[in-house]
Image (cartoon, rainbow, N blue to C red):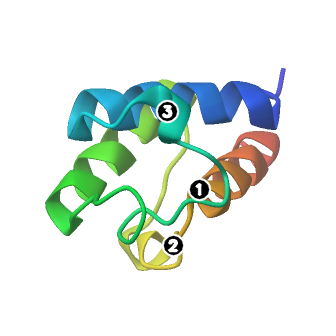
C-alpha cells in the first residue's frame, strides 16, 4: 500500500531531525533543504540513504540534485513507491 504524502512528510521530517537536528515542525513541503533547513551536501546524502531505507525506494545520485525542497523529495518518494 502506498504511503500518503503526509506519511512521507512525517517520515522525512523524522529523518531530517535525526540527521541535521532540525525540529520536525520546521520540515514543511515548501522549505528548501539548503536555504531554509541548512542541510549541507553531506547531510543530504545521509537523508537520502535513510529515506531509501525507510521508504524502500531508490533515489539515484543524479536525481538528488533535483530535490531542492522537502516537497520535491516527498513527491519523488510518493511516485517511486507507487511504481515500486
* Quadrant (top left/top right/bottom left/bottom right) for the C terminus: top right
Q: Residues within 10 Å of mark 1 (few under 14, many from 20)?
A: many
> Percent from the top left, x then y, of residue 35?
39, 71
Q: Residues within 10 Å of mark 3 (few under 14, many from 20)?
A: many
Of residues 30 and 58, the one nearer the viewer is 30
Q: Earlier in the sequence, mark 2 or mark 1?
A: 2
Q: Which mark is residue 68?
A: 2
Q: Is residue 27 left or right of residue 1?
A: left
When the figure is inspected, residue 28 is found, relative to residue 55, above or below; the finding is: below
The residue identified by callout 1 is 73
Residue at mark 2 to residue at mark 3: CA–CA distance = 15 Å
Q: Earlier in the sequence, mark 1 or mark 3?
A: 3
> Percent from the top left, x then y, of residue 74?
66, 49
> Percent from the top left, x then y, of residue 12?
51, 35
The residue identified by callout 3 is 13
Residue at mark 2 to residue at mark 1: CA–CA distance = 8 Å
When the figure is inspected, residue 39 is found, relative to residue 84, above or below; the finding is: below
When the figure is inspected, residue 17 is found, relative to residue 80, above or below; the finding is: above
Amino acid at each position: 500500500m502506498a504511503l500518503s504524502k503526509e506519511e512521507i512528510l512525517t517520515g522525512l521530517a523524522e529523518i531530517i531531525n535525526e540527521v541535521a537536528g532540525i525540529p520536525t515542525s520546521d520540515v514543511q513541503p515548501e522549505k528548501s533543504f539548503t536555504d531554509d533547513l541548512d542541510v549541507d551536501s553531506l547531510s543530504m546524502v545521509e537523508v537520502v540513504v535513510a529515506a531509501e531505507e525507510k521508504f524502500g525506494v531508490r533515489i539515484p545520485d543524479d536525481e538528488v540534485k533535483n530535490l531542492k525542497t522537502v516537497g520535491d523529495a516527498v513527491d519523488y518518494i510518493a511516485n517511486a513507491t507507487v511504481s515500486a
